[in-house]
Image (cartoon, coloured by chain):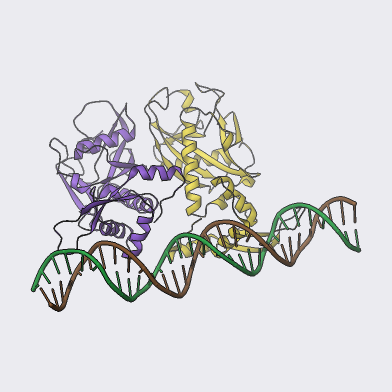
Chain colours: A yellow, B purple, C green, D brown
Amino acid sequence: MTTTEASKTTSHSAPILDSITIDCVIFGFNQGSLEVLLVKHADGISKDKWGLPGGWIYTDESTDDAANRLLLALTGIKDIYLEQLRAFSAPDRFPVSRVITIGYYALLKREDWVGLKPGATASEVAWFKVSEVETLIYDHLHILEIGLKRLRRRIKQEPIGFNMLPEKFTLLQLMHLYEEILGYEMDKPNFRRKILRMNLLTALDEKQKDVSHRAAKLYRFNPEVYQKLQQKGFNFEF
Amino acid sequence: MTTTEASKTTSHSAPILDSITIDCVIFGFNQGSLEVLLVKHADGISKDKWGLPGGWIYTDESTDDAANRLLLALTGIKDIYLEQLRAFSAPDRFPVSRVITIGYYALLKREDWVGLKPGATASEVAWFKVSEVETLIYDHLHILEIGLKRLRRRIKQEPIGFNMLPEKFTLLQLMHLYEEILGYEMDKPNFRRKILRMNLLTALDEKQKDVSHRAAKLYRFNPEVYQKLQQKGFNFEF
DNA sequence: TTATCTTATAGTTTATTTGACTACAAGTAT
DNA sequence: ATACTTGTAGTCAAATAAACTATAAGATAA
């Protein structure tokens, strides 16, 4: 394999599968915008171009394990929300040799992100607004699009949006997240009513601070309640 | 690679990827039951055991192409509804060597199925009721479960059920398909109203024949209308 | 300190959709 | 002719969604 793709991984020398990689679309929500974490390749045929973070798969790990390993190495964070998208397999997707990649997408709390982890291989890492990404190496733009499509679908069916918000958030912040991802505006009172009626949020005895207007109540997502409701056949829907 | 996995494919000698396969869950609807097409392996470590049809991927084709090629070889039918599930990658999923498989699921009209195509490699092929499948080779039972889950989700969001019915069908047949897949009973008049209101069905000037009761009107799914409605933001939902 | 601005939150009203039913129509079988 | 089965139409109450109004709770500034 060329250094181009090999540069995706750490310098770890464990045996790897030689024609399969993983690539990950990492979403974050920052100042009202949906963003994606990209890396700039240090060398190889895609030198100085931006692409999705990715890497090889060790022979003794699943692709889920590989994706989690990659995320930990890149962000220093464990237990990131992660879901497989699918395999991307166009014969010419990678110009040097035949490589199939398994796409993933992850949701990150921006408050957990502290910058590039020392020791990571990428020469540069940065957040980009999803709406402003225009070109990426290989078929990574396509993977990003599929990831975005999946996120839009999922966020209407499962309460995963919280994974991109701080632990404590206001209902308006949550609504803005939905508006940004789904691409349309919503009605504040109706949104409140609908989400509160589900009982998935715990109201805290706390309010926003440092805002120049009436402070809103803070809420926390309650995964335990969600699990219980799910078992009773409850279906999250937006 | 061993003959076990190799026996999945035809004896074609085109170059293949050596650690990736595809496996396909083929669903059909017959006499009120959801069924799956399985093959019995002729030799190798899984000799005489039932599993999903699968095969290798040529170096110059995508996994979608490989899946379509497999389906054509197995059934003789082109243009089968096909969607990728995801990659299955547990390191020990295939006991002989490290092989990742890309799972697919397909929907077949049982009227198109004419029995095993001459020249196919599998020693035996048969339809099984999904509810009665208990053991399959490797992780194929898991793939089947994921396929079923995906089918249940999709059928509520997109009008794909028609792919398992004859061209002309009655509303009750369609409802029975939904009941069987989703696992709960529905109300006849309400079902009619909801599906007809969507305008996706063309009423034909024909009725059922050879039934010992009042014959129901036959309908046909109209993909053109669906496409137009989709562009206008229409969302199929059940 | 009062007026004004901004956002939070509560409530109203109407239209639409769902779910559970009833009723009748159109055939077949006895 | 009668009973039986399934198809199809229609009713009605309850639940939900969409659009909107109104008020509350602060912060800011005249």
Which quadrant of the structure image shows residue B100? top left
Task: State the image coordinates of residue B63 (x, y, percent, origin top left).
Answer: 33, 34
- Give the camera-side residue of A172 and B162: B162
Task: Assign the N terminus of chain B to one quadrant of the image.
Answer: top left
Of residues A15 and A91, the one nearer the viewer is A91
Does any portion of residue A212 appear in the rendered image? yes
Quadrant in the picture for residue B8: top left
Location of residue B142 in the rendering, given as x and y in whole percent from the top left corner = 32, 50
Identify the residue at horizontal 62%, vertical 46% (top origin).
Answer: A112
The correct choice, above or below, for B155 with respect to B224 in the image is: below
Write the residue at 30% across / 33% down.
B65
Residue B186 visible somewhere in the drawing: no
Q: Is residue B92 left or right of residue A76?
A: left
Q: Residue A61 location, x and y as percent?
A: 41, 41
Q: Is residue B198 left or right of residue A71?
A: left
The vertical placement of A92 against B231, above or below, is above
Q: Nearer the viewer, residue B98 or A203?
A: A203
Q: Nearer the viewer, residue B199 or B46?
A: B199
> Is residue B154 toward the left or the right of residue A180 in the image?
left
Q: Position of residue C2 (x, y in %)?
A: 89, 62
Q: Is residue B77 above or below residue A45?
A: below
